Structures are given as structure tokens and as C-alpha cells.
Amino acid sequence: METLLIVIFVLGYLAITLEHNLKIDKLIPALAMMAILWALMAFGLDGFSTWFDSGAHHLMENFGLLEHEEKLELLEETLLHHLGKTSEILVFLLGAMTIVEIIDYFDGFATIKSFVKTRSKKKILWIFSFLAFILSAIIDNLTATIVLISILQKIVKDRDTRIWYAGLIIIAANAGGAWSPIGDVTTTMLWIGNKVSTAMLIEHLLIPSLVCMLVPSFIASFLPAFKGEIDAEEEEPLKSKFGPTMLYLGLGAIVFVPIFKTITHLPPYVGMMLSLAVVATFAEIYSNKKISISSVDHESDAAAHHSPVHSALTKIELPSILFFLGILMAVAALESLGLLFNFAEGLKQSMPLMGTEMEGTTVSDLVVLLLGVGSAVIDNVPLVAASLGMFSEPLDDQLWHFIAYSAGTGGSMLIIGSAAGVVAMGMEKIDFFWYVKKISWLALLGFLAGSICFMVMRFLF
């Protein structure tokens, strides 16, 4: 049965990558794969000998001795657990995307657009790379990608050029998220799991992450896509006098989310909903002042024209949300049966130990590097969850820092390997194979350069 589940996952994954060839939206195989995997698990429940406890991050003991009703109850609890964890990400994403759309409703991004005076493609590349690296550490790589691609759409009108920038933004955002405890969901997991502390994480990963961003950006700056200048366009008058105010309010509200989490210890989506409520309140107040706003879609429902919130909600990429739901829940099915845990454990035992005993590292660097490569193919969240159950190293051990780096930046090698990539794929309709041909090799070079930097720093210090 386990083999059948893996085959279905592989077939579903292939259908996602061949989206344009099959002419089937990627959310369809993702949702079908999720439903089929969980259904087969329910049918063959008595035939499974292992079960992974996601809450405790280890395999359950005596699972095979449980009665059918007990197993069925455990299946329902596990499904609800994963749906809850996935929904946290999706609700957070919905809140962030809505705030961004509200800012756009007031033409707030034109304020940042006015700051970018240069027309040089190379200079714009460096500006957005550093913006992505810094913003992702503050407002997480997912939200930073949404914000920067929204701004990019206002500056670079040619889509063929813009998707190149989007590819480098994905790399820079994932690199920036790796060194911050709130920058990426995997580093947040390690942080909440008491495996890394904020100060030590920044100290050990800031420079390797910066290298991971600089190397691809430097190489890309010599590519034909970034030579010359973008077409100059006439400066358009602001659609709303409240644009700058809504921009600063919206970004400030997003920055407030990690502060709210630190103070209350509640999941990030709670703070995001509070931020959305505040931004939406000001948006409604400003909208009722009869300001002149020209709607992009003149055929939208009449209610959407007088309400910024309704207008923003109609423009959210729901297909991307559903795709994300399908992928995460499908991977959760494999995790629940302990397949990912056993895979990682097998790697640990089969690879030669290459760690540095001087630093207390007891696991192969090659295994962690493979974890990074694996996070590009399979979602990095369950892989990091598996590593939490695999290893028992203490707080701030070098192993945890390396895992945080590898899982955070390795996903850049495929566009569906990270949340930032999935969102960019949805916003710009980037083709999977175009990304593999044009961007993946840059992401790989950056990943390897940062990994070498981390190992050198570990040896020296």
C-alpha cells in the first residue's frame, strides 16, 4: 500500500509539472492527489505498521496493535491536525494578499515605484534583490515576494523581462528568510521547537544567506535579460491621495504580525487577521470620503467598487491557495505514515559521517545538503518536521543552523519548492520548465556557495 501511495504522489507531482503540456490547471492534480492519498489511507488503515505522531515528531509505538476504531480515530485526529497547520498558513496568506490588494486599490505601490528612478535593468535587479533579502527577514519570505512582485508589475511592464526578476526575487526572499526566526516557516518551526535561538541563528546564518543571495544576483547581472534599460513610461498621477498612507499603514501592519506573535505567543495568522482588520477599517474610512479611484475592472460587481475590501478579495489568487492546500495535505499524508521519517533516517544511516566532531556535529553534512535538495522537490515543512524527530542535538547545535539554511534556501531550486515560489508562480503564471532552465542553476549555485560559506565559518569559529 505504501508503494501505491508513493506512485500516486509521483504521478500527481508529474501532472503538476506538466501543467502546460496537459492543459490542466495545477490545482486539479494537487487536490485530487490529496483526496486520493487520504482515501487510500482510510481504506488500508489496518495494513499499515507505522504511524508518525506529528505533534511529538516521532513514530508511534505499538500502532499495529491498535483496534480498527482506534486507528480510524487516530486518522481523523491526524487529518484534523494537518488541516489546522495548513490552514494557519493559508489564512495567513489570505490576510497578507488582501492587505497587499487593499494597498494596490489605493495605488499605494506607486509610492515605492517613484523611488526607483533608474531605468537600468541591472540596477533594478540589485535593488529588488536586496529589498527581498531584507523584507523577507522582517515580514517573511512569502509576504515579501507578494509585495515585491506587486511593485515589480508597476515598474517592469514587459512580462518576459519581469519573470526573470521574479525568479531572482524568489532566491533572495528564501535566502533572507533563512536567517530570521520569522522569515520562513521552517526556521519558525525550529525556533518554536527550541532548537535555535534568535541571536545565534542570525550570527551563524546571516553571512551564508547573504552569499546565497549575492552569487546568483551577481551572475544574473551579466545575463542578456538584465542588459540595457526598461522602457520609460510617463509618470501617472496618483489615483488616490491616500496611497502613501495606505502603503505605510499596510506594510506596518504586516511588520506588526511577528511583534504580536512574540507578545501573545499566538500563531501568526491571528496577528495577520488583526492587521487586516485595522487596514480594512482605514480603507473603508478613506473610501467613504468620495475619493477618486479608477477601478481596473470596470465590469466588477457594483459592491466591489465602493468597498476596497470587497475589491481586494475579488483579486486574490484563490487557485494558488487551493494548490497550496493540495500540496501540503498530500505531503502530510506521506508524513503521517512515517515514509518521510524513514527516508530521512535511511539517509542518515547510509551516508558516511562527514560532520566535524570538533563542533559536536554527529551527522553527515551530505545528509543535510540532501535535505536542502529534497526541500525543492518535497515541501520543506515535513522534511524539517522529520528532522526534529530524527536528531536529539541540543539548542543552537550547528546541525540545526545548517538544517535551517538548507531547508530555507534549497526550495529555490524548483519554483514549487517554496511558498515564495508557489505564490510567484501564481502571480506571474511562470512555467515550471522555464524556471528549471533559466533560474534553477542560479539557485543551485547560490545554495552551494552559501553552504560552503557556512562550513568554512563553522571550521574557523
Image (cartoon, grey):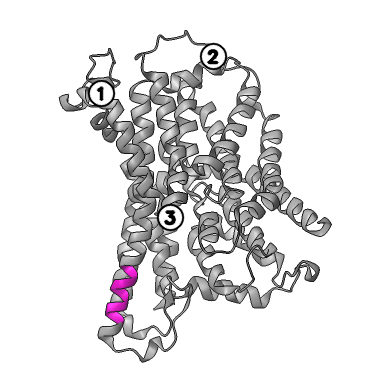
Residue at mark 2: 231
Q: Earlier in the sequence, mark 1 or mark 3?
A: 3
Q: How crowded is mark 3: few (under 14 residues within 10 Å), some or many (20 or more)?
A: few
Residue at mark 1: 285
Q: From the viewer's perspective, tell me whether residue 215 is left or right of residue 106.
A: right
Is residue 72 rendered magenta in the image? yes
Eyeballing the image, is 441 above or below 118? below
| Residue at image coords 36%, 85% | 47
Q: Which amino acid does label 2 sit on?
A: Asp
Can you say which quadrant of the picture contains the N terminus? Answer: bottom left
Residue at the front extreme, as displayed: 263
Residue at mark 3: 265
Q: Where is residue 5 shown, x and y percent of the image?
A: 40, 71
Q: Which amino acid does label 3 sit on?
A: His
| Residue at image coords 44%, 26% | 248
Q: Which amino acid does label 1 sit on?
A: Ile
- At mark 2, the secondary structure is loop
Q: Where is residue 387 shown, x and y percent of the image?
A: 56, 68
Give the camera-side residue of 210 and 219.
Answer: 210
Give the camera-side residue of 12 and 108.
Answer: 108
Q: Earlier in the sequence, mark 3 or mark 2?
A: 2
- At mark 3, the secondary structure is loop
Can you say which quadrant of the picture contains the C terminus? Answer: bottom right
Instruction: Calculate the distance from the C-alpha at mark 1 to the C-alpha at mark 3.
Output: 31 Å
Q: Which of marks 1 and 2 is nearer the N terminus?
A: 2
| Prevailing secondary structure of the magenta residues | helix
